[in-house]
Image (cartoon, helix red, strand yellow):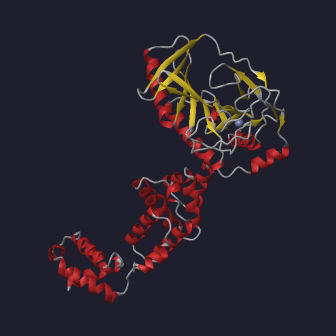
Amino acid sequence: MTKIGLEIHLQLNTLSKVFCSCSTKQVETPNSNVCEICCGFPGSKPVLNKEAFEKALKIALALDCKINRVTFFSRKGYFYPDLPKNFQITQYESPIGINGKFRGIRIRRVHLEEDPGALVHKGSYCLVDYNRSGIPLVEIVTEPDFKTAKEAREFLRELITDLSYLDVYDKKSDFGLKADLNISTTGAKVEIKNVNGLKDIEDALTYEEERQSREVPKNSETRGWNAERRITVLQRTKESEDDYGYITETDLPVIEVSDKLLKVIKDSIPELSKEKLTRFTSQYKLSDKDAKVLSNNKRLSELFEKVAKQVDPEIAAKWIIRDLVNQLNYHKKTLDQANIKPEYMIDLLKLFEGKNITDNTTKQVMIKLIKEKNFSPKEYIEKNNLIMQSSNSKIEEWCEQAVKDCPQAVEDYKNGNEKSLNFVVGKVMQLSNKTANPDIVRKILVKLIRK
Ligand SMILES: [Zn+2]
């Protein structure tokens, strides 16, 4: 039976590094965001970034972990050029959180650590960039509770969604989401190191499951994921666990998590996606599908809720969850990029709700909102005479013209082809610059043609 466990690394969205005041901002120039501390010069002393600790604590609480009320840091010793002080500051014996649960998967531990530097391979030689050295990472380790690659991917997707609700995770960084994947099928356990992104994680696990059915691993193996060839590659076999010779980091104090801090952090945890999903279906009577689209997207759900306060939720759902999402996808933009002001969306949908503009106009203006954010739909609609025409005399004029212009369609309709009326309606919409009330158009056309 396949068993999969994940060791997930996420970059926290703090302004400065975890043990010094260097910026975490990504910069072009290598080795420019560095100091004695993050480069581990002799005599330099780390100081813990309070924000990083509190964000890690927030993640542990959101994953339902038991919090270690007394916690400290350790030195994980290993020798590698990306780590000038020859140890990484991490947590070993006393992670911030243990024994949690998320979406039915047991969480073994959540701890805070620093990222090492980055090696830049240049053909026959290699350069080191320490800008990443000391960037705060949270490691989330699950128990081997996943049975399929797909389950693991779905779990990670939901985890990322909730972390974005917690506002702790740096989505914009190149680092994104990285994980070590542990997978065993019938033989020994195999670890696939450093796989980036949801798709590659799922593909690496799927590949490995299939490979292990062909070549059963006798000893534990460490493998790497070759993203170009879409295969895992053997790095080393091991008889025993790695020995990192952990020792306590005595340059950092032991941290006591007070009742007060615990309460403050607990209270700062917002409604997460699962609760949102349930609430959206009951409060706004949304379908499961619509509620899921919303609860998976923080920005979209915020926009929806603002609009649904002033516009019928059913109308808001149709236009925001379906049309807006479709149009954003079509124009290859995210909601963040489009950055639509909620008040503009409210203005637009109120006009639609009050039957002041047609379906078609609503759609056109929404597309304009996606493309250019700085214009008021209300002013634009008034200026361009896009208010829906419901005056019968005006519509009658357009209808008479359309009947003249489309003799064949009129004839077909008279001969019983109901659908050909749509063609004439289309003509009226064209003549009216899409402002004629389609219900009235239909009524008038039917009357005119039957005369
Ligand atoms: Zn530094």
Q: Is residue 398 visible?
A: yes
Frontmost residue, 128 versus 278: 128
| Residue drawn where x is 37% and y is 82% of the image | 389
Classify residue 355 by image quadrant: bottom left
Vertical arrangement, residue 137 with respect to residue 161, above or below: above
Q: How many marks?
A: 0
Frontmost residue, 261 versus 18: 18
| Residue drawn where x is 53% and y is 10% of the image | 218
Q: Is residue 110 visible?
A: no
Vertical arrangement, residue 436 with respect to residue 241, above or below: below
| Residue drawn where x is 82% and y is 29% of the image | 251
Where is residue 417 drawn, in percent x and y?
Answer: 19, 70
Frontmost residue, 232 versus 425: 232
Where is residue 446 drawn, in percent x and y?
Answer: 25, 80
Classify residue 140 by image quadrant: top right
Classify residue 406 by image quadrant: bottom left
Vertical arrangement, residue 295 with respect to residue 56, above or below: below
Ligand 1 image position (quadrant): top right
| Residue drawn where x is 20% and y is 86% of the image | 451
Q: In the displayed image of the protein, which residue is found farthest to the bottom?
A: 393
**Is residue 158 left or right of 451 when viewed as pictured?**
right
Where is residue 428 drawn, in percent x and y?
Answer: 27, 77
Vertical arrangement, residue 194 with respect to residue 361, above or below: above
